[in-house]
Amino acid sequence: MSITIYHNAHCGTSRNTLALIRNSGAEPTVIEYLKTPPDRTTLQRLIAQMGVPVRDVLRQKGTPYDELGLDDPKWTDEQLLDFIVAHPILMNRPIVETPLGTRLCRPSEAVLDILPQPQRGAFTKEDGEAVVDAEGRRIGSR
């Protein structure tokens, strides 16, 4: 069972997502994408697997998004990929790949939809929000 998380340890959502993966009993491959950024081919593959537009993986807050004018619709997907490769901080996180799919896990509990194994116990996010009960069931499950 292979799980990979593109992780930023300074991001609470990313830390919560990693903790949820571990709460299922899995130990993922953790790629700190700011230290080891994915190459263009990997980015294209991840985005294709998620089935989302390139713009959906762009992060605005705390990035050069505004100064680069990335809100301008003139930028093609190829150009946006170039920006992400040049400035990895532009990649929104965390992105998680599992045998059941690839997803941008915002909010962190979105990872529950693609984990092969159930949660092993209760889980509460860093902000105090309970998302999994003591029996490993999602709270407020859809």
Image (cartoon, grey):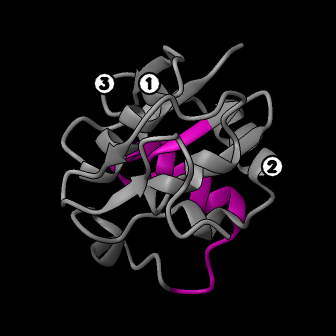
Residue 82 visible in image: yes
Disc number for residue 36: none
**Residue 57's image quarter?**
bottom right
Q: Alpha-carbon neighbours of circle 3 within 10 Å: few (<14), some, or many (≥20)?
A: few
Left or right: residue 90 compared with residue 76: left
- Front residue of 46/114: it is 114
Q: Quadrant of the C terminus?
A: bottom right
* Residue kind at label 3, given as amino acid type: Lys
| Res 37 visible | no
Whole-percent x and y of residue 113? 68, 50
Span highlighted in magenta in the image? 72-96
The amino acid type of the residue labelled 2 equals: Ala
| Cα–Cα gap, marks 2 and 3 | 23 Å
Which one is closest to the eye, mark 2 or mark 1? 1
Mark number, residue 35 = 3
Q: Which mark, by number, is residue 22? A: 1
Q: Is residue 98 above or below residue 101?
A: above
What is the three-letter code of the residue carrying label 1?
A: Arg
For mark 1, give the secondary structure. Answer: helix
As drawn, 117 above or below 45: above
